Amino acid sequence: MQQEREQGDRSSRGAGQSVRQGTALAALGGALIGALTGLAGSLLVYVQAEETQKTASNGRQADIRRAAYVGLGTSFQSFKTEITGVRNFIINPTVTKEQREDQYNKMYVPAYDRLMQADVTVRLVGTAVGKDVLAQSVPQREKVKDMIAAAFTAAELDTVKFAKEFDDALLEYEQAINAVIDKVDAEVL
């Protein structure tokens, strides 16, 4: 009988130990589930924060690009106005050389400088597409610039021919700038 009692005690101890192990495993399982839930929640918050930061960064970049493209467009319009004024002074026979040079230095040069600043800004902050299209406008800009310089240094100038060629070159440059704006407008919206 004592043997039966010892076996009963052992089985009670085994059952108690089994219950304790089950409770410990349940507690460990609960802790593990809690830890995994916390980790998943933290990971979700991290991913959402990263996406929010990326969205905000993309928004800031788009704002910077938009300002650069607007600057290019407005600088071109100012340049066009001033260079057309210089052209008019060049072909006007009643305007003196000093008046032409004054118009060139006071109006054209600052407008050209602003245009170049806008050009550089687009090259610095624009996308690859914007930069490529802008690079295609450089030959037209340089042609217009060179025509004005040549008109100032020419001993004699056929003003009718110059005016026609200049107007054509300026139109080509305007079309090139418009191509830049058309190409990049989707980038900034």
Image: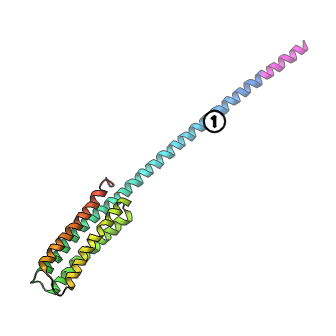
Residue drawn at 13 percent across, 79 percent down: 159
The spot of residue 134 in percent (x, y) is 32, 65
Q: Can residue 127 be seen in this view?
A: no
Number of marks = 1
Is 163 left or right of 38, judged from the image as shown? left
User: For residue 181, what is the image quadrant?
Assistant: bottom left
Residue at the disc numbered 1: 32
The answer to whether residue 104 is above or below residue 188 is below
The spot of residue 41 in percent (x, y) is 53, 40
Residue situated in front as seen by the camera: 146 or 54 = 146
Secondary element type, mark 1? helix
Residue drawn at 24 percent across, 65 percent down: 74
Residue range of the region highlighted in magenta in the rendering: 1-14
Is 169 left or right of 34, judged from the image as shown? left
Determine the main secondary structure of the stretch shown in magenta: helix
Q: Is residue 122 visible?
A: yes
Colouring used for the render: rainbow
Residue situated in front as seen by the camera: 91 or 23 = 91
The spot of residue 93 in percent (x, y) is 10, 83
In magenta stretch: residue 13: yes
